[in-house]
């Protein structure tokens, strides 16, 4: 069989096929975006069929024998090129994706997709009734499928390593345990001190109403000021905020408003804009290839959290943000100055819900899920005992009584589709602090720029150090190039210690 080759090279033909895979994937993502934003409820069944067809076509195209052959021939064509060149990176990263994809039998992929679709309504019902036992059979299946996925992918030490390898290359279970131990050692005593002086922060402004229509347009103005390019994006409403990419010219965000300042979309819009600015900054030369994406879930989350927390909840940002917010919502901000708003936005309040957690307690939410997931996968914990294991950790890490199942192990949707999807949130926190510390050294007056509403120097630095590379570098290589160190916990610990010492006087 003669394979049509555009420019006579295997690499040229490989780019052609990968472009088609990318088109199929993005078409599916557009259908998902529509499902979350504008689709009427009656569309669910047809949409599921459309998504499953596109997903199957993309998977078949990527794992075809043709791609396997092209990868081998292309490897010799890029031999001798620098490792970080577009072509060498394309062959290396596609090889990794291909090897992972072909190891997982198509039947298992289909079984996982079907199980996830069936588990979703079961989870909704169980959550509404706050009854873990209703979800337990679905969870048994999630654990079983994750185990089979880990076996199919293969691993050296721990089965959880295989699941991590899909989203977090470079990171093993043992390494995550060490990072969490370091965080725990620093944050448990810090949290105890903060609790003892909780009265120092008045956060009552968060409970004041914030007009929802004006809130939405104000959030959009804010993220455009940060550097989100509206000529290549748009903002819509959805139940759960997310960011999605159909190409370098079309990177969209969604958000969700709430009736009070504390429930408002302001910081969740900044969060999604952080993801979107990452995607808008990837080099166009990587478009329609597997390289046009974030380096990992953790690196992606580092961009959203850097803008949301390290910038957006920082004192310099509030110097710029507060007068604008007060002008747009004078009744809400009455009697609250920039310092008061800064304090309120950073109040530390241990709570049951991960997505509402403050910076200090957030990692505990990820830690407890990670510990439960690894124990389930390694057979050290039974599904029926998850609520008990959850309650023990909530008590130990957050100092709270056992939650209702609704506010405990049933709060997140993630366990309807698999294990291993939480660690990136914490890695993102760590990486964001490492990058911010390095940006502070590289940029002469970062705080002054931010306080003046000039975000271009920081965005430019992130473009250069992180965004433009797409997936060419692994997370450790990327972070080491930008900061001189691989992913580590020290800078994040130093950041929270300094910030919350100032806030709570501890
Ligand atoms: Zn995010």
Image (cartoon, rainbow, N blue to C red):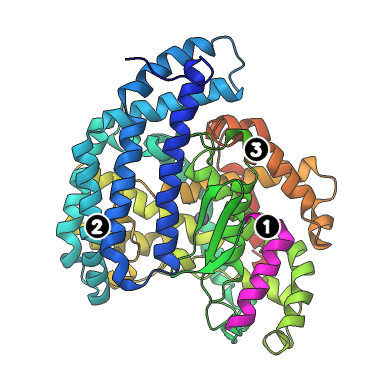
Label 1 environment density (alpha carbons within 10 Å; few <14, some 14–19, many ≥20): few
| Residue that badge 1 annotates | 231
| Residue 260 appears in the picture as rendered | yes
Front of the two marks 1 and 3: 1
Q: Secondary structure at mark 2?
A: helix
The quadrant in which the N terminus is found is: top left
Exactly how many numbered labels are in the figure? 3
Label 2 residue near ligand 1, CB within 8 Å: no
Question: Which of disc 2 and disc 3 is earlier in sequence?
Answer: 2
**Rendered location of residue 225, percent (x, y):** 74, 62
Specify the quadrant of the image occupied by residue 501.
Answer: bottom right
| Residue 154 appears in the picture as rendered | no
**Rendered location of residue 287, percent (x, y):** 56, 37
Quote the CA–CA distance across marks 3 and 2: 35 Å
Residue 95 is a magenta residue: no
Boundaries of the magenta span: 212-232
| Residue that badge 3 annotates | 468
Question: Which of disc 3 and disc 1 is earlier in sequence?
Answer: 1
In-image side of 3 versus 195 (left or right): left
Quote the CA–CA distance across marks 2 and 1: 35 Å
Residue 230 is a magenta residue: yes
Observer-nearest residue: 352 or 104?
104
């Amino acid at each position: 069989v003669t394979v049509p080759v555009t420019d006579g090279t295997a690499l040229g033909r490989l780019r052609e096929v990968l472009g088609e895979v990318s088109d199929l994937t993005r078409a599916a993502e557009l259908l998902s975006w529509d499902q979350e934003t504008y689709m009427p409820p009656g569309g669910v069944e047809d949409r599921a069929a459309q998504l499953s067809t596109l997903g199957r076509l993309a998977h078949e195209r990527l794992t075809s024998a043709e791609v396997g052959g092209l990868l081998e021939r292309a490897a010799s064509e890029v031999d001798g090129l620098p490792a970080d060149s577009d072509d060498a990176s394309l062959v290396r990263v596609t090889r990794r994706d291909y090897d992972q994809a072909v190891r997982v039998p198509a039947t298992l992929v289909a079984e996982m997709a079907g199980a996830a679709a069936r588990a979703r309504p079961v989870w909704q019902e169980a959550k509404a009734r706050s009854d873990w036992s209703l979800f337990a059979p679905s969870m048994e299946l999630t654990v079983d499928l994750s185990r089979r996925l880990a076996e199919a992918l293969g691993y050296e030490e721990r089965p959880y390593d295989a699941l991590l390898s899909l989203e977090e290359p470079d990171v093993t279970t043992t390494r995550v345990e060490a990072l969490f131990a370091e965080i725990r050692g620093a944050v448990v005593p810090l949290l105890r001190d903060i609790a003892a002086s909780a009265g120092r922060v008045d956060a009552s402004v968060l409970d004041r109403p914030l007009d929802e229509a004006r809130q939405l347009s104000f959030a959009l103005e804010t993220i455009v000021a940060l550097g989100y390019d509206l000529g290549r994006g748009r903002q819509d409403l959805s139940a759960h905020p997310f960011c999605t990419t159909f190409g370098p010219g079309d990177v969209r965000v969604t958000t969700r408003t709430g009736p009070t300042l504390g429930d408002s979309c302001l910081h969740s819009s900044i969060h999604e804009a952080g993801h979107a600015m990452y995607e808008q900054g990837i080099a166009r030369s990587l478009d329609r290839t597997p390289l046009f994406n974030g380096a990992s879930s953790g690196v992606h989350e580092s961009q959203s959290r850097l803008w949301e927390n390290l910038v957006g909840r920082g004192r310099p940002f509030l110097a710029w943000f507060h007068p604008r917010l007060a002008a747009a919502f004078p009744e809400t901000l009455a009697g609250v100055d920039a310092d008061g708003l800064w304090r309120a936005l950073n109040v530390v309040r241990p709570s049951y819900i991960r997505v509402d957690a403050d910076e200090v307690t957030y990692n505990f939410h990820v830690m407890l899920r990670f510990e439960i997931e690894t124990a389930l996968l390694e057979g050290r914990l039974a599904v029926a005992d998850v609520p008990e294991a959850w309650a023990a950790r909530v008590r130990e890490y957050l100092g709270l009584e056992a939650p209702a199942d609704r506010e405990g192990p049933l709060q997140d949707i993630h366990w309807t589709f698999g294990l291993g999807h939480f660690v990136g949130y914490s890695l993102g926190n760590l990486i964001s602090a490492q990058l911010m510390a390095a940006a502070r050294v590289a940029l002469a007056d970062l705080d002054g720029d931010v306080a003046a509403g000039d975000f271009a120097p920081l965005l430019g630095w992130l473009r250069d150090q992180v965004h433009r590379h797409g997936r060419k570098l692994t997370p450790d290589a990327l972070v080491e190039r930008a900061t001189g160190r691989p992913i580590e916990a020290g800078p994040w610990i130093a950041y929270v210690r300094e910030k919350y010492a100032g806030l709570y006087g501890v």
